[in-house]
Image (spheres, grey):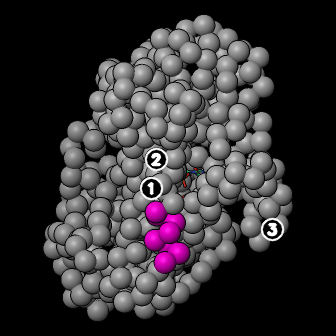
Amino acid sequence: MFARRVMVVGTGYVGLTTGACLASLGHEVVCADIDTAKVERLRRGVVDIVEPGLSELVSEQTSAGRLSFVVGNSAALASFEEGRSPEVVFLCVPTPMGAGGVADLRAVESVMEEVGASLAPGTVVVNKSTVPVGTAERTAEMLERADIGVVSNPEFLREGSAVKDFLGPDRIVVGSDNQDAAERVAALYARLGAPTVLTDAASAELMKYAANCFLAMKLSYVNAMAELCERVGADIADVTEGIGYDRRIGQAFLSPGPGWGGSCLPKDTHALLQVADAADFEFRLLRATIDTNTRQRQRIVDKVRLAVTGKRTGSLSRVRLCLLGLTFKAGTDDLRDSPALAIAALLRQAGAELVGFDPAFVDGPEALKFRDGEPAPSEVEGVPLAADAVSAAQGAEAVLVLTEWAQFRSLDWSVMAAAMKRPIVVDTRNVVDPATLRRAGLTAVGLGRRSDPSDN
Ligand code: UGA
């Protein structure tokens, strides 16, 4: 394998993981960011995001001399050894979808303006972030350099398992209208031995949306199926286990929940819908996927209302509720498009009084090491935070489990029950054993479960 000189622009989720992982594959990597304080922290090995194994990898690769962090792109270019320049430049900068489905490529544009003219002939520029279809083509237009190849190499990593996903990918996707450039990017990953799809740039760009939208569709399907289970007296866990053994369906991504969220699935489903609209294609399946997800949040609120008041139209005014888990899923401190927060907003509108607890936002020995010494916040988007689950449950008329943190499963639920005003647990992730809750004297309400009290 040839070690390559790689420059990574942007040290966000994708950029930092890409930089650290490519260094671990033996490449010489320089990561550039405009945030001086962040670069300082990264040089000290402090990683701002909760990502298992990432800070260790950053420290290890920095000490090994394969990974470095620099403020600004020109400085990064200059920091390669005398007379040498990067062979591959990864663009890991934000590329939001602008009005009318057109890519907002200002970040890419400013990088190209800054360093485009200084890149050596034969350099390959790679779009790694999720970018709207057509971005590679527009990047090439901005560059105005026929001697530089532009490649789309979408990333499929999940938050919370980014390093594992990067180093053990299901596939590598490389798309370009320049075959040689595409092959050189594919070669960077050769050691991983993953299936590699070599294609044109537009197909590679679309593939990323196609994957995320398919996953969103799978989840909306499962949430709808859970609702149907409730109506016909079936059990979603059995149904998903049974269908999951079919290899064409697979066991993964079949857990019902309060709706899918995060920084990717909501953004990408809307973006693809815009792409379809712009192409004059009515993508009904995708629209239904999004609508089902929006409805899921209201469905959780309806469940809470029924469980607490005994009526579908009962009032939640001044009802105290404890929310366990506020991030968009367990194992992260990311609150972007969190279904838990969307549900919290609906509950607040209905007059409920909320107290939250999330293991991502605690101080002390249990604290996740991502805030670099800063104390945990005392509230998240208007939801006051308690220091532990039992304090959050104090006086609550119901506890809602909104993310699947393992510690919610192993809580001492009899202590929780003693703290609560009324014994109701609405488990929107079906993670806490209903028998354990019942033994603690609690009424368990989950999604699509045969054992739950009927709410029809
Ligand atoms: C997602 C994709 O899974 C990655 O492949 C992709 O690279 C990434 O977006 C991206 O585009 O960058 P991520 O946003 O980290 O990754 O989150 P997921 O683990 O996919 O979860 C998405 C949402 O679905 C979460 O709200 C999660 O709680 C929910 N979910 C997931 C369920 O409700 N049930 C499941 O069985 C799985």
**Mark in the foreground, 2 or 3:** 2
Q: Residue at x 32, y 79 (%)?
A: 135
- Of the pair 190 and 322, the residue shown nearer to us: 322
Is 252 contained in the magenta span? no
Q: At label 3, which amino acid type do we have?
A: Arg
Tell me if residue 82 comes above or below residue 411 in the rendering.
below
The quadrant of the picture occupied by the N terminus is: bottom right
- Counting from the top left corner in percent of width and height, residue 406 is at 64, 31
What kind of secondary structure does the magenta stretch mostly adopt? helix
Name the residue tied to disc 3.
Answer: 247
Image quarter where ligand 1 lies: bottom right
Q: Are marks 2 and 1 in contact (CB under 8 Å)?
A: yes
In the rendered image, residue 242, in percent from the top left (x then y), is placed at: 83, 57
Neighbor class of circle 3 (other Cα within 10 Å; few <14, some 14-19, many 20+) is few
The residue identified by callout 1 is: 294
Q: Which residues are magenta?
A: 284-291
Mark 2: few, some, or many residues within 10 Å (few <14, many ≥20)? Answer: some
